[in-house]
Each structure stands twice: as C-alpha cells, then as structure tokens.
Image (cartoon, grey):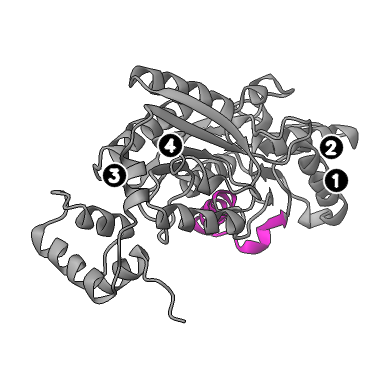
Amino acid sequence: MKSKATSFDIAYAAGVSQSTVSRALCDSPLVNPETREKIKKIAQDLNYKVDKNASNLRKQKSKTLALLLFEDPTSDDSSINPFFISMLGSITKATASAGYDLLVSFQNLSDDWHAVYEDSNKADGLILLGYGNYTDYEHKLSQLEEQETHFLRWGAPDKNHPNISIGSDNFKGGYMITQHLLANGHKRFAFIGDIGASAPELKARYEGCMSALHEAKLGSAMLQHVDAISTESDGYLATLQLLDEFVGDKKPQAIVCASDLMAIGAIRAINDRGMQVPKDFAVVGYDNIPASSFSTPAITTVQQNTVLAGQLLVTNLLKLIHNESVVDILMQPELVIRRSCGAN
C-alpha cells in the first residue's frame, strides 16, 4: 500500500523547506505567489490533504510556551547540565515580558514528548534545551517538523533541519582557546571530550582546536584525544588515562576540555597524581559555568552568551507562532582567561 503523502514529500518535490510548504498551503503572504501555486499544484498531484482537525487545534492559542529540558549525565542526581541554569532564567524573563506563561518540563529522550505539547494545546510552541545523544534526538526533530510544530532549539545549526536553531560558534570557541594556549608557548595538546556524531557541539570544539594547531604548523600528532562525556567524573577518569598513556615526548603540556565540568575533574586528577595546574599542565574548559570561577585554580574557559540566547529563543519562537520567518543564529563566543592556563 502506498503511504500517505506528507508535507515533506511536497517540500522535496518543490525544492523548498517544509515550513514554506505549510505557509503556502495556508496562503501566507510570506510565500511569493508563484511558489505558492507551484506548491499547491504538487500537493494536488500527490493527493495531499491538510488535517483540518490538527490545523484548527494548532490555531488555538494558549499564551503559554513550553521549555523542555532533556536529561544529561551528571555526577549528582539532578540530570541537568548546569550550563542551562542561567539560560533558564533568561528564557523565563523574556517569556514574561512578552505576556506569555512558561511551562517547564523535564524530559527523557525515550518519552513521546514530541507528540503531546502543541497538538494537545498545552503550549503554542516549544523551546528545547539539551539532547543527550544527537543521533537519537534528531529523529524527534524530524517528527516535530512533520507535525508542523512551532519550536526552536539551542544547539549547532543543522543543514538537515534549517531555521530551528540558535547556538554559539563552537568551532571558533575551540580555535580561540587553543590559539591562546599556543601564544603561551604550549606545543603538545590533549583534547578530552566526545567528538562523534552524537555530540556535534563538542566535535566542533575539537575541530576548532585542530584548526588552530594546523595553522601553527603543528600536526595532528601534537593533539592526543581521550573520549569522555561532559561530567566531572568522566573528566577525572579521562585525565588519569591521559597521564598513564601519554608520557615522555607525548606528554601534553595543555589539556583542552570540552566543558568546564570535565576541566574540574581534570584538575582533580592532576592534583591526585601529585602535580599542579598550571605548573605541570595548563587546563582549559568551555561554557563558563559559575563553578569554573571558583575552582582552584580558576578555569580559563569560553563564554557563551546565555542571556542573549534565552532572549533570542523566545523572540524567534514567537515569530514562528505568528507565522513570521526566522533563520538559524550562530552567536560569537568570548574567551575568559583565568589562572588554569598559567596566564592572566
């Protein structure tokens, strides 16, 4: 039996995005008349029918936004990445300023969270923070797009899912912090963090680090890598592995951690081995969580503008709710220099 045509089938045939198809079928003035007619003709040829019940339900307004926080591995029982705490405050303020209520919900990626919020009229749109394993999470993004749900996410833009992301330039952040370490005379490096498809932001930080080394005429052999998830305990264990495996002329001078949490664990591991930061190793992190400034020594890191991020997530989501177009936004990171790299 031939499967029912979807808006994604129309988008593919027309060479446009799924959101453009949705707007064209609703006669939105944001789509030029020629494209609207082309899309309607393809929809007719594919015998595509708009689900009127779902469409009417989506048009009802609850004046509520839903913020879905996804569980992350943590060293305690919170399962919430502390990086998102400051963003949560910004989202709450921006939502209130716009005259909306905010529904905050903690989600497990195995749940059917993608199916319940907007279509049940609990909220007019969704903001997604965190994702665990991106390869699992991406499938849910496709389902949200298929349902024509109004949503935005914090994270790296994905060409397969355009115009739904607000994030920070992780490649540039990794590049900047490695450039700073190079300027302080370090030539042998290690990177701690997941660099696979499941963690695109961490992978981009690694690629930025590698780019800075190549620019400095240092080969990939000067960058060791140990895989780890973003927790203090994984940073600790990865650093112990690093200290055991890479000795002599392979011993790194600087350890680039993909998050501040890992950097906190790395410093603890170095101290437990009777060495010191930054005397024996430079250690840097990423995210500028509050604990990074209170660590001993305080951690050199990369700041992502969580206040602006929260404001943009709310502002752009409201635009989507009102059928206005939005684009992906990639914010610029800022280097925060402290004592853990041996320089002010």
The amino acid type, in three-letter code, at marker 3 is Val
Q: Earlier in the sequence, mark 2 or mark 4?
A: 4
**As drawn, 92 above or below 39:** above
Q: Residues within 10 Å of mark 4 (few under 14, many from 20)?
A: some
Q: Earlier in the sequence, mark 1 or mark 2?
A: 1
Query: Spatial distance from mark 3 to mark 1, Cα to Cα?
Result: 45 Å
Please tell me whether mark 2 sits on a helix, a strand or a loop: helix
Q: Which residue is drawn at the image coordinates 38% and 43% (left, top)?
A: 150
The magenta stretch spans residue 222: yes
Say which residue label 2 marks: 269
From the image, state whether disc 3 or disc 2 is nearer to you: 3
Could you give the CA–CA distance between mark 1 and mark 2, rounded to whole angstroms?
6 Å
Which element is circle 4 on? loop
Q: Which residues are magenta?
A: 201-225
The secondary element bearing badge 1 is classed as helix
Which numbered mark, 3 or 1, is in the foreground of this view? 3
Mark 4 and mark 1 lie on one chain; the one further toward the N terminus is 4
User: Which of the 4 image quadrants contains residue 123?
Assistant: top left
Quarter of the rendering containing residue 299: top right
35 or 82: which is nearer to us?
35
The spot of residue 126 in percent (x, y) is: 45, 38
The answer to if 305 sits in the magenta stretch is: no
Is residue 269 toward the left or the right of residue 318 in the image?
right
Q: Which residue is mark 3?
A: 326
Q: Nearer the viewer, mark 2 or mark 4?
A: 4
- Which residue corresponds to mark 1? 240
Q: Amino acid at mark 2?
A: Ala
